[in-house]
Image (cartoon, rainbow, N blue to C red):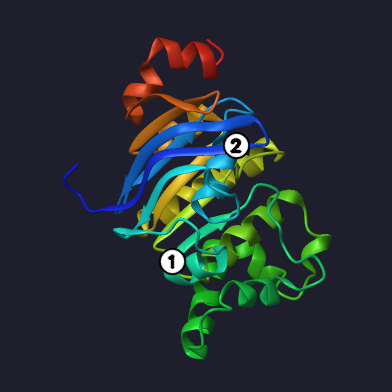
Amino acid sequence: MSEQVVLKVTGLKVAYGGIQAVKGVSFEVALGELVSLIGANGAGKTTTLKAITGIQHVAAGQVEFLGRPIKGQGAWDLARQGLVMVPEGRGTFTRMSITENLQMGAYTRSDKAGIAEDIDKVFGIFPRLKERATQLAGTMSGGEQQMLAMGRALMARPKVLLLDEPSMGLSPIMVDKIFEVVDTIHKQGTTILLVEQNASRALSLANRGYVMDSGEITMSGPARQLLEDPKVRAAYLGE
């Protein structure tokens, strides 16, 4: 790959007790790409993201961000450097308003004018959040909380945005909206690693994809090629 690689994972292994959840996974994401990591529930996708972002202990292997090894660094340090994750389950601050949640996303920044400008940008991407700026996050629907979690992550001005199952548990209409927003954010220049069980939607947005099964990468290639692959279609698209 000739483009600048911004995230590189090599031989990553993660174990829970005696169980190896991730078994020597390697992949990379280049600047400006949207890369999808797909696979069934329990394949090790979320564990991989947690290991990359310093939330989960890494047993072996290497993770490089912007050309530097980052294994062992705290999630807060990585967020400050521009590696930002929207976790599965959203993790919004339920007793804070929408605006306060967005301000929390910018906690590593001190440029007040820039923060205000970015809140306006987030409200431009998510008009529904703007309408309810003073509403408590805990009173919102799951889809609205997902929008808020994504907006909050954007407040950190991510160089690479990691999205963990953004469509999980949402209504079909809200799933459409969330994928539309992922596409918009990518087209505005954000590099994205998207972990998603909805393989067809994830691959239809992505430049490239990796298929994960039982803790290993079993296939990789251009997203369109994976979408048309009979094995992928049989295993993940129900055909």
- Location of residue 89 in the rendering, given as x and y in whole percent from the top left corner: 70, 48
The residue singled out by tag 2 in the image is: 15
Mark closer to the observer (1, 2): 2
Instruction: Tell me the quarter of the picture where residue 9 sits.
Output: top left
Which quadrant: the N terminus? Answer: top left
Nearer-the-camera pick, 192 or 213: 213
Which residue ends up furthest to the left in the rendered image?
2
The residue singled out by tag 1 in the image is: 82
Residue under the image location 29 percent in, 54 percent down: 31
Nearer-the-camera pick, 50 or 198: 50
Quick one: SS at disc 1? loop
- Location of residue 201 in the rendering, given as x and y in whole percent from the top left corner: 50, 33
Q: CA distance from mark 1 to mark 2?
A: 26 Å
What kind of residue is marked 1? Gly
What kind of residue is marked 2? Ala
Quick one: SS at disc 2? strand
Q: Is residue 197 visible?
A: no
Residue under the image location 51 percent in, 67 percent down: 79
Instruction: Tell me the quarter of the picture where residue 40 sits.
Output: top right
Q: Is residue 9 left or right of residue 76?
A: left
